[in-house]
Image (cartoon, grey):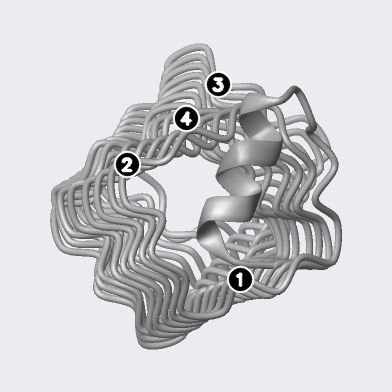
Amino acid sequence: MNCDDIVQRYLAGERNFRRADLRSANLIGAEFVRCDFSDSNLMEASLARAHLERCFLIASKLNGAFLYSANLSFVKLKQGSLIEADLTKANLQGAQLIQADLNGAKLSGASLRGVSLYRANLPGVNLCGANLDGINLRSANLANANLNWTNLNGARLSGANLRGAQLNGVKLKAAWMNGLELNGIEFVGMELQEVKLSGAKLVGANFTGSNLRQGQLRNSHLNDANLQQSKLNEANLRGSQMIHANLMKTDLREADLRNADLSHSNLNLAQLNGADLSGADLRGAYLWGADLDGAILRGADLRGASLRGAGLIGADLQEARLDGVTLPDGSVHG
């Protein structure tokens, strides 16, 4: 099938071009709206500025294709191969790229609003500064990707591989990141309000000065994490592990810390007004000057903790274990 044939067939009203062999074809600026190119070979094809809106390209091969400024809005490219394809400034709005292989693809300046990249292969992809608000990247491979200054607000990233990814200045407000492995990640001074990080592995992560207000971090692993001066007010940290975590001057007002493990953590000068620490493990924790006014500490284990200078007005300490606790006045509870 040559280029002239397929153009004439399209103009005659034909739309079914499944299994077409268009390798290295020159179709620059061509129009093929709502066509079916599933299982086709478009490797090395020149499709710059082509109109492929709402086409079916399921399992098609576009390796090395030149798609500069092509209109691929709402295309179905499930399991498609776009290895080293040039998608610079392409319009991919609403495209379905589920399980697509974009290894080495160029996406600079591409419009990706509403794109689904579920389980897509994107190792080392450069998305620096891209607007990916609400994008579906669940279980996608983003290893070593450049996500610096990318807008990922509301993005679905649960199950994604972010090992080695660059995340400087990334926006993740209300992003879904449940269960991700982000041990040692640097998230200093970031806006992470309402982020979903339940079950995430964040051992040794650095959240200094970050805004995690109303974040969902249930059963997360934050041992040795640095959360100094971060905002976690109204956050859900129920059942989280925060052993040896640095929470100095952290805002934890109204936070849910039920059954959290905060043993040997640094909570000096932390704001815990109205926080629920029922059943929490605070053994050996430092709470010097912490504000616990109105906090719920029912059944909490405070053995060996230091509450020197802490505010406890209205705190509920029913059934709390207080053996060896240093009280606000400096005395040690028997």
Residue at horizontal 44%, vertical 80%?
A: 44
Q: Element under label 4? A: loop
Instruction: Answer left or right for 229 relative to 282.
Output: left
Amino acid under disc 3: Ala
Q: Nearer the viewer, mark 2 or mark 3?
A: 2
Classify 10 Å Cα crowding around label 1: few (below 14), some (14-19), many (20 and above).
Answer: many
Amino acid under disc 4: Gln
Asked which quadrant contains residue 267, the reply is bottom left
Upstream in the sequence, badge 4 or badge 1? Answer: 1
Which is more toward the observer, 171 or 267? 171
Quadrant where the image shows the C terminus: bottom right
Amino acid under disc 2: Gly
Q: Nearer the viewer, mark 1 or mark 3?
A: 1
Can residue 132 be seen here? The reply is yes
Q: Is residue 161 above or below residue 56?
A: below
Residue 156: image location, x then y, percent: 61, 43
Distance, label 4 to label 1, CA atoms, is: 24 Å
Upstream in the sequence, badge 2 or badge 3? Answer: 2
Residue 143: image location, x then y, percent: 46, 84
Upstream in the sequence, badge 1 or badge 2? Answer: 1
Classify 10 Å Cα crowding around label 4: few (below 14), some (14-19), many (20 and above).
Answer: some
Mark sitting on residue 22: 1
Distance, label 2 to label 3, CA atoms, is: 70 Å
Distance, label 1 to label 3, CA atoms, is: 73 Å
Q: Is residue 279 above or below residue 107?
A: above
Q: Element under label 2? A: loop
Mark sitting on residue 93: 4
Disc 3: which residue: 315
Upstream in the sequence, badge 1 or badge 3? Answer: 1
Disc 2: which residue: 29
Q: Is residue 296 above or below residue 70?
A: above
